[in-house]
Image (cartoon, rainbow, N blue to C red):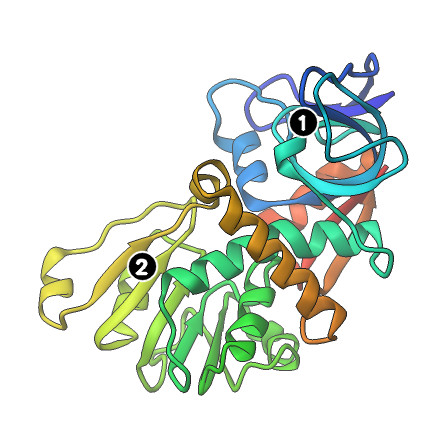
Amino acid sequence: MRRVRYESPGGPLFVEEAPLPVPGPGELLVRAEAIGVTLPVVRKVTEAAEPVPLGGEIAGEVVAAGEGVTGFGTGDRVTGLCFGHGYADFAVLHETMASPVPGNASAVDAVALVRSGLVALGALEAARPEPGEAVLVTAAASGVGQLAVQLARTRGAGRVVGAVSDPGKADFVRGLGADHVISYGDASWGTPVDYVLDAVGGELLTRALHALVPEGRLVAYSSGGGAIQAYDLLVGAKSVIGFQMARIARGKPELYEQWREELWRLFAAGELRARVHGEFALEDATKAHAEIEGRSNLGKVVLIP
């Protein structure tokens, strides 16, 4: 089979022939039909001290199951998070990380919706939103941000503001349901909001905090880091909440499954749609990563084996 790998920090990425994986206890071997490209994986290539397997979101058909698997069988369509080599024709998923793909959804729908949607929904839940409140979503045109904008609307947000790196993304974000769109470099971010869902981090954290009303909440779920001055929290009695999807997946599997079911319910009802920026062949993984690195994507970037 083919898989994408790299040998030194920063790449380059290349396709190589590799042996077919063998699923261990509790694992599924999946023939990949779609693979989601995410910013954390892109950052691993550019920032990790040593090369790591390119894992992430995959969707496809189960072709073999390891010992002890009870929830899935050969021929089932699944999606989930792969912690090993996921940029490949075949990948291994642990059963606990897999979920069924309904018949009305494609593999591309699945990788664009489930993992990114879980992060967006989890960040939204962490903000404890009340109906009618105003929200600002950073990276609003990204794979996660586009879903956060839509989910905030389904949860009754009174005003949804999308923040983007490029003003050229404004029409796309308005099409998702945002009432207003601002650019990171704008002198003013407009009327303060009740909560911010931040996927960018870094220097943008301070601006996101200042965009809050007194007693507002900032949910930080970016892998980009950043720091906040304690005084900025004290002066407005504001809160910063960290959110990490992995903690939910490992520690609260029932909640994880509940959120997955909600995403598919909203999808089936036509209330949630994951926009796809582009589909790339495995051989074009470098181009797919460049779209993410350059922050030029409008929606999800997907690899098609």
Q: Give x and y (percent) for residue 94.
A: 65, 28
Confirm whether residue 33 shows in the render.
no
Q: Which residue is mark 1?
A: 12
Residue at screen point 73% across, 74% down: 269
Residue at screen point 61% across, 72% down: 169
Q: CA distance from mark 2 to mark 1?
A: 31 Å
| Marks 2 and 1 in Cβ contact (< 8 Å) | no
Mark in the foreground, 2 or 1:
2
Q: Please, what is the three-letter code of the amino acid marked with disc 2?
A: Leu
Near-viewer residue (279 or 117): 117
Q: Give x and y (percent) for residue 188.
A: 33, 81
Residue 275's place in the image compared with 57, above or below, is: below
Q: Give x and y (percent) for residue 246.
A: 47, 40
Circle 2 — which element? helix
In which quadrant of the rendered view does residue 205 lie?
bottom left
Residue 184's place in the image compared with 302, above or below, is: below
Left or right: 227 as drawn, with respect to 298: left
